[in-house]
Structure formats: C-alpha cells, structure tokens
Amino acid sequence: MLFMFLYKGLWLGFVAYPLWKNGELAGSEAEDWVQIFMLIVIPIIFTPWKYVFKTYVLGKD
C-alpha cells in the first residue's frame, strides 16, 4: 500500500500538476488518470498510520 501512495503521489506531482498548472490537463489522456489517482485520498485517510510507523519505520511488532 505504501508503494501505491508513492507512485500515485509522484505521478500526480510530476505529471498531472505541471499539466494542470499550464492549462494543458483538460482534454488530455492524463485527465482521466487524475480522476482515478485522486482517490488516493481515501486510503490515506483510513490507513492506521501509527501502526505503519511503528512496524515499518521503527521495525517493531
């Protein structure tokens, strides 16, 4: 799941944002992907971040 956050966030930041900023996002193929990738907000909200930090960052069970 962390990999999904990483690649979707990077794509939104490095592909979609510059297109949107330059006014080229509307009508492009990337527009459809933005709508899908913006749903990343839902799993980010419901991820148990305390558990993720403790398990994957600190290495404790």
Image (spheres, rainbow, N blue to C red):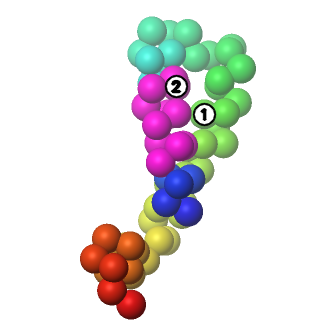
**Disc number placed over residue 44 in the picture, else none:** none
> Is residue 60 found inside the magenta-colored segment of the image?
no
Q: Which comes before the other along the chain, label 1 or label 2?
A: 2
Seen in the picture, residue 43 relative to 26 is either above or below; the reply is below
Q: Position of residue 38 (x, y in %)?
A: 56, 44
**14 sits to left or right of 26:** left
Q: Where is residue 34 in the image (x, y as percent from the top left)?
A: 60, 34
Q: Where is residue 14 in the image (x, y as percent from the top left)?
A: 45, 26
Q: What element carries label 1?
A: helix
**Residue 31 is at least partly visible in this image:** yes
Image quadrant holding the C terminus, namely bottom left
Query: Which residue was labeled with disc 1?
Result: 34
Q: Do the residues labelled 1 and 2 touch (CB within 8 Å)?
A: yes
Q: Residues within 10 Å of mark 2 (few under 14, many from 20)?
A: some
Compute the Cα span from label 1 to label 2.
Answer: 7 Å
Q: What residue type is labelled 1?
A: Val
Seen in the picture, residue 48 relative to 6 is either above or below; the reply is below
Dominant SS in magenta: helix
Q: Quarter-wise, where is residue 51 in the image?
A: bottom left
The residue lying toward the viewer, choosing from 2 and 23, is: 2
Query: Which residue was labeled with disc 2?
Result: 16
Q: How many labels does the image show?
A: 2
Q: What element carries label 2?
A: helix
- Residue segment shown in magenta: 6-16
Q: Where is residue 5 in the image (x, y as percent from the top left)?
A: 50, 52
